[in-house]
Amino acid sequence: QSALTQPPSASGSPGQSVTISCTGTSSDVGGYDRVSWYQQHPGKAPKLMIYEVTKRPSGVPDRFSGSKSGNTASLTVSGLQAEDEADYYCSSYAGSNSYVVFGGGTKLTVL
Amino acid sequence: QVQLVQSGAEVKKPGASVKVSCKASGYTFSNYGIIWVRQAPGQGLEWMGWISAYNGNTIYAQMLQGRVTMTTDTSTSTAYMDLRSLRSDDTAVYYCARDRNSVYSGNSWSSDNWGQGTLVTVSS
């Protein structure tokens, strides 16, 4: 069982927006602005999409955005494209006991 | 450009050890930390630990304490992950990844460059 809770699946049509949630506790998501989101295509290594809750690495389209409210972080993908179909994982710093915890992953399907 | 190239797939028997390497290029190796993450077949990501290539400091996930050792060789810009007393549930793809921030900035606890992964199969 993963420390952070994500919905197992999400979907949307091309051009639509979809939001994926990541729920933790005050000891991880709620306690630190150190939430990251990773995209993983089948058979590939994860790719960093969002770090420090809202920041986008260079090269990541601005269709991807992150936010946080309380113990829940969210990844929003706007203007869905076929290549966005992938698994998405959130992670958070969790202090000096657990350090980094991941969510169980969300499979995003572009209909 | 930043590249992390990992060693090849391994097949081990239960109780054995495995050592996975991760050779970095395209940046100053000692300025960044390296994390190790594993992914069991069809499962999610699991953080294993972190090592500073600057001073060798390590942090290990509690569930792996005593079985895992992470090291670096700055002369070859290579990080290593050694896992002992292997069990069938250690079967996974093992990834190394570079910290997004250098040792001179605050830790963002995120990783922006990943190796290609190394499949370790534990089977009798």
Image (cartoon, coloured by chain):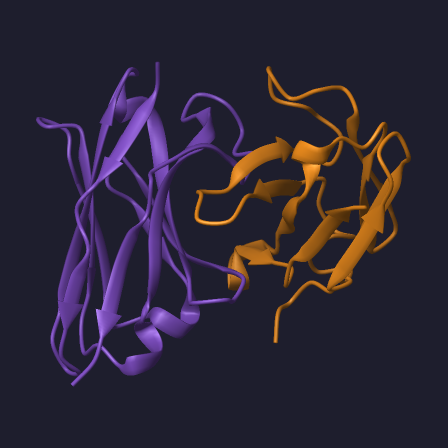
Chain colours: A orange, B purple
Q: Please state if B115 lies on the left or on the right of A47 as rendered.
A: left
State the residue at coordinates (73%, 49%). A108
Residue furthest out toward the left:
B75
State the residue at coordinates (57%, 34%). A48
Quarter of the image for residue A82 reads top right
State the residue at coordinates (50%, 66%). B42
Q: Can residue A23 be seen?
A: no
State the residue at coordinates (8%, 26%). B75
Q: Quadrant of the N terminus of chain A?
A: bottom right
* Residue A72, placed above or below residue A66: below
Residue B103 spot, x, y in % from top left: 40, 26
Residue B47 spot, x, y in % from top left: 46, 57
* Residue A59, placed above or below residue A43: above
Quarter of the image for residue A63 reads top right
Residue B82 spot, x, y in % from top left: 18, 59
* Residue A14, placed above or below residue A92: above
Q: Please state if A72 lies on the left or on the right of A88 as rendered.
A: right
